[in-house]
Amino acid sequence: MENPLMLMIPGPTPVPEPVLFASAKPPISHRSQGFRDLMAEITANLKWLHQTQNDVLILASSGTGAMEAGIINVLSPGDRVLVGCNGKFGDRWAQVCEQFGLITERITVPWGEALDPEVFRQHLEADREKQIKGVIVTHSETSTGVLNDLETISRHIQDHGQALSIIDAVTSLGICPVPVDEWGLDVVVSASQKGYRMPPGLGFVCVSPRAWQADETARFPRFYLDLGKCRTDAAANTTPFTPPVNLYFALQVSLAMMKAEGLPSLFAHQQRLMQATRAAVRALELPLLVPDDRAASPAVTAIAPDQVAPETLRFKLQQQYGIVIAAGQDHMRGKLVRIGHLGYVCDRNIITTVAALEATLNSLGYPCQLGAGIKAAHNIFSANNF
Ligand SMILES: *Cc1c(COP(=O)(O)O)cnc(C)c1O
């Protein structure tokens, strides 16, 4: 029998059955009252998830498209931007900025380390002419499993008074607190296949009043990704172009499920999954790419095995157990494996993955004690402080 696959990658993530079933209904017209009612409910719940009064717009795109929209709607050619680069996604946003002719300054630290908020403060404070128009930060850097200190960095951006924050929250929204209004975030981007417990296909852009002001004078050409057009139509609970209505059905159900659970419970659950995974990795004496717990992302854990080949480990896990984990990206390919624990993942997924990991390591000649990882994960799961 072929193994049914279990996704333990940082997107796409497992999807609950009620969400899948919702998307299997016959499509409806996006110009119907039924759709307007659906969109009204979704919009209200998106604001709840973002802890904001700002607009949250929905695009038919992956996260990258939503991020591109966030950048081009509020900036103009020749504007200066700071981009935090400590992994693949930070690098990607710097590339997008360069493609569009923005003067792009990277704030770089090695992969696996967190961005230093102090360096942002220095750059912003030194900009007395207020030429920096945007600061781009990836909150949870999925390529390494680092959670950057967005709260502190956003405080420095606010102190600057001119620059807008443009935040990749793709693997933090719904996974750990991203209180958009409290932190004063201007543009916040996310995508359905990560924290939303949804299939891929929808991107989200949350836009502050200050960012809307910038949108009025921004000069990049835009048509499909014109957020102003989205906003006008969203006010009437519709969309400028045909939306993937079946994904909207799915989103309605997933948001309702998340809301029933409540944000504190969602975030605590993700913390447990992360802590159990990290405890297991430590018990197996595998090197964590991010040893510092304070910098660890609750979405994904990267391991840098030094005694087994990461790609062999990944291949065997999938072949023998149907468990899919992710590889390293770019120059970390062949050096890392990454375990995603975001989306509709529960204790069972972690226990199963750790058990399979132990067995596979053993079969590859790595001398770990069978059961050591399970025991460590179980200790976290059975603690009462969650
Ligand atoms: C997945 C992801 C994205 C979006 O990638 P798409 O493939 O375009 O959906 C962006 N940023 C981060 C940090 C991600 O993990």
Image (cartoon, grey):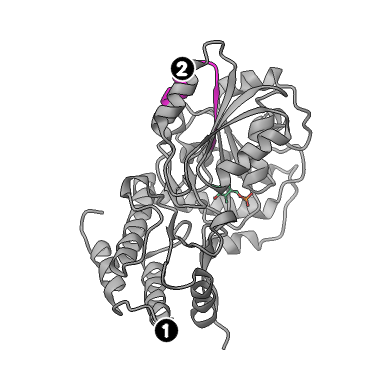
Q: Residue at x 62, y 46 (%)?
A: 63
Eyeballing the image, is 377 above or below 302? below
Left or right of residue 337: residue 105: right
- State which quadrant residue 26 falls in: bottom right
- Circle 1 Cα neighbour tier, 10 Å, few/some/many (<14 / 14–19 / ≥20): few
Q: Is residue 314 in view? A: yes
| Quadrant holding the C terminus | bottom left
Callout 2: CB less than 8 Å from ligand 1: no
Tell me residue 169's x, y (percent).
Answer: 51, 42
- Outermost top residue: 129
Tell me residue 357's x, y (percent).
Answer: 41, 74
- Circle 2 Cα neighbour tier, 10 Å, few/some/many (<14 / 14–19 / ≥20): some
Q: How far, Cα to Cα, is label 1 from label 2?
A: 55 Å
The disc labelled 1 sits on which kind of residue? Ser
Seen from the viewer's position, the closer of residues 215 and 368 is 368
Tell me residue 149's x, y (percent).
Answer: 40, 37
- Return the residue at label 2: 125
Q: Is residue 182 in view? A: no
Eyeballing the image, is 198 above or below 220? below
Eyeballing the image, is 71 above or below 59? above
- Report the span colored magenta: 155-167
244 falls in the magenta region: no
Tell me residue 301's x, y (percent).
Answer: 42, 58
Q: Earlier in the sequence, mark 1 or mark 2?
A: 2
- State which quadrant residue 272 falls in: bottom left
157 falls in the magenta region: yes
The disc labelled 2 sits on which kind of residue? Glu
Question: Could you say whether the residue bearing mark 2 is in a helix, strand or loop?
Answer: helix
| Quadrant holding the N terminus | bottom right
- Return the residue at label 1: 363
